[in-house]
Amino acid sequence: MDGLVRKSPVSRVMPTAAAAPAGLRLRRALLMSRATKPVVFVLALLPLLLLVWRAFTMRLGANPEQAVIWTTGLWALRMLLITLAVTPVRVITGWSELARLRRMLGLFAFGYALLHFTSYFGLVNDFSVAEVAQDVVKHPFVLAGMTALLLLLPLAATSTNAMIKRVGAARWRRLHRLVYLIAPIAVFHYWWGKLAKNNTADPKIYAVVLALLLGWRVLHALRARQRARAAG
């Protein structure tokens, strides 16, 4: 979801196939292989498959409803941060081929977030809108989670090539900058939920990771602006 349109051609950062060292050619072949996306897809789906297996084998613990909700929510946040990490890793390492995985990872973040909300809506509130409304009033972290999910909806809906063309590249990029708002809201949602249990150690780690990812983007944008001014 993070800058899908701005895919730099491999040739801008990679040597030609003839000139590239064997290691670079191998890496490029692996990342551009037809098998790469299916492998990443299965890896991203694995937490859900393990959760289903735990449910069928009665290994979700004393509170299976909470286990489902926490697991899907945690993986939604992880996938969101992994998606945000693609661009820094791509720029720092020069592995421009990673950009082709970003859209799929972003959709997995939305998918896990949707499962998280559906689990909460059905397993905790018996699909009662009134119960959810009361929760929103009583608990700010519930409101934060629902806000993050609603903001993810237009990003997921416009993640196809057809929608990118329909919306237009410039407007699409502006729309998908919402991810920089969604991620802090998602971390706040997780942090506040753990705060009620007096356990914020894990949320602090995710907050630090997010701060590093967003901080890198700010520095990268400032440096790019400085280079543009120097060149102009």
Image (cartoon, rainbow, N blue to C red):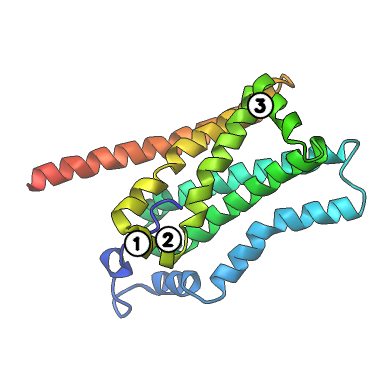
- The x and y percentages for residue 143 are 61, 29
Give the labeled residue for mark 2.
99
Judged left or right of residue 111, residue 53 is right
Q: Which secondary structure lies at badge 3?
A: helix
Judged left or right of residue 76, residue 182 is left
Give the labeled residue for mark 3.
136
Give the labeled residue for mark 1.
7
Q: Which residue does the image show at 84% across and 56% down from the upper left?
A: 53
Q: Nearer the viewer, residue 51 or 85?
A: 51
Judged left or right of residue 34, residue 53 is right
Q: Which residue does the image show at 38% across and 53% down from the upper left?
A: 3
Q: Are marks 1 and 2 in contact (CB under 8 Å)?
A: yes
- The x and y percentages for residue 163 are 42, 62
Sequence-wise, the earlier of marks 2 and 3 is 2
Q: Which residue does the image show at 73% across and 38% down from the upper left?
A: 70
Q: Residues within 10 Å of mark 1 (few under 14, many from 20)?
A: few
Type of residue at label 2?
A: Ala
Q: Nearer the viewer, residue 97 or 6?
A: 6
